[in-house]
Amino acid sequence: MADTIGKPANFHHTVPEGDERERLVCKDCGFIAYENPRVIAGAVVEHDGKILMCRRAIHPQMGKWTIPAGYLENGEAPHEGAAREAWEEAMARIEIRDLLAVYAVRHISQVHMMYRARLATPEFAPGVESLEVALFAWDEIPWNELAFPSVHWVLNHYREAEDRTDFAPFTNPA
Amino acid sequence: MADTIGKPANFHHTVPEGDERERLVCKDCGFIAYENPRVIAGAVVEHDGKILMCRRAIHPQMGKWTIPAGYLENGEAPHEGAAREAWEEAMARIEIRDLLAVYAVRHISQVHMMYRARLATPEFAPGVESLEVALFAWDEIPWNELAFPSVHWVLNHYREAEDRTDFAPFTNPA
């Protein structure tokens, strides 16, 4: 899940002709590498009333707990990305239910699309990006060791959605 | 709204060490330009029971009708991008209501996030990317001159949503 870090040596930020924003442009050939927000696809996965969580084996926030989630890849729909991440990070096959929340994390230009899901089969195990994977009852969730604010948000929104099946997705808390 | 076209001369597609997918990598410095799906943010904007539409002044589909929509920019939330596009393409100030639909257009790696909105003030005019902007009653919509399949989808989903205010966003038609 590495992100774009830095920029290649022969690129610089400049406003191309006819544009209004700075873009990353190659000084040699004029190629414009448009930078747009990236989609993070993830899922709150439930099994027997418990929630599947992963302890991160990678930076940032190594050792902290999160839900399966990561960058959407080209050619994927968001719910497909969420299912792939559950497989990669928790070796879990999941069944997507519905879109629980859409968060904008503006300062890092991310759009989080978080789904509700269930384990399709009761197996799971740490993928290469996880130290540990576990099911937690609500009161067992390691609230003080969550990796990101959005993990707090999505867990609370999951709780708030309860058994409703037709609702507008939650958005950033006020 | 230009998209990334081609690639810079000194980049090639290869699978970086520790990755499982081909990435666009600089042959000189090893920089990885991750390519991820882009978010298209747009809105079905209603005023007096009519829907605001734009006739495209740009390729692709120049001369065809669409709703205000375009690439989400860094630092924006999707609903903010939809409002900006309504301003840029239709010189319209809009008030976002709710998330109407999320479409995955896999073959071009786009995620469309379409909102319901209203004109905040009754003014509109063609922006630089539009030849013409107009309000259409349902039966006046130029169905045979719509720019993209997703415009059909979103208009029909808008109609299907009717006056409901708490519903799961629509997704790609079957």
Image (tube, coloured by chain):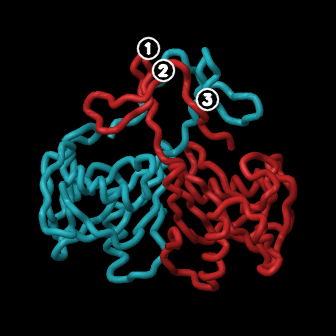
Chain colours: A cyan, B red
Q: Residues under labels 1 and 3: Cα distance?
A: 17 Å
Mark nearer the viewer, 2 or 1: 1
Query: Which secondary structure, mark 3?
Result: strand
In the image, is B39 to the left or to the right of A129? right
Q: Secondary structure under badge 1?
A: loop
Q: Chain of mark 1?
A: B
Asked if B6 appears above or below B42 in the picture, the reply is above
Residue that mark 2 sits on: A8
Query: The numbered mark 2 sits on a residue in which chain?
Result: A
Q: Is residue B51 left or right of residue A174?
A: right
Q: Quadrant of residue B112?
A: bottom right
Residue B85 image point, x, y percent: 70, 54
Query: Considering depth in this image, is A5 or B103 the residue closer to the camera?
Result: B103
Q: Residue at x 44, y 30 (%)?
A: B24
10 Å neighbourhood of mark 1: few (<14), some, or many (≥20)? few
At label 2, counting other C-alpha atoms closer than 10 Å, the crowd grade (few under 14, some 14-19, many 20 or more) is: some
Residue at far bottom of view: B163
Query: In x, y percent, where is residue B74?
Result: 56, 43
- Residues at marks 2 and 1 touching, judged by CB atoms closer than 8 Å: yes
How many numbered discs? Answer: 3
Give the crowd class for mark 3: few <14, some 14-19, many >=20 residues within 10 Å.
many
Query: Residue B14 placed where, x, y %?
Result: 37, 28
Residue underneath mark 3 = A32
Report whether residue B44 is seen.
yes
At 29% from the left edge and 38% from the top edge, which residue is drawn?
Answer: B20
- Badge 2 amino acid: Pro
| Residue B28 badge | 1
**C-alpha distance separating marks 2 and 3:** 12 Å
Q: Amino acid at mark 3?
A: Ile
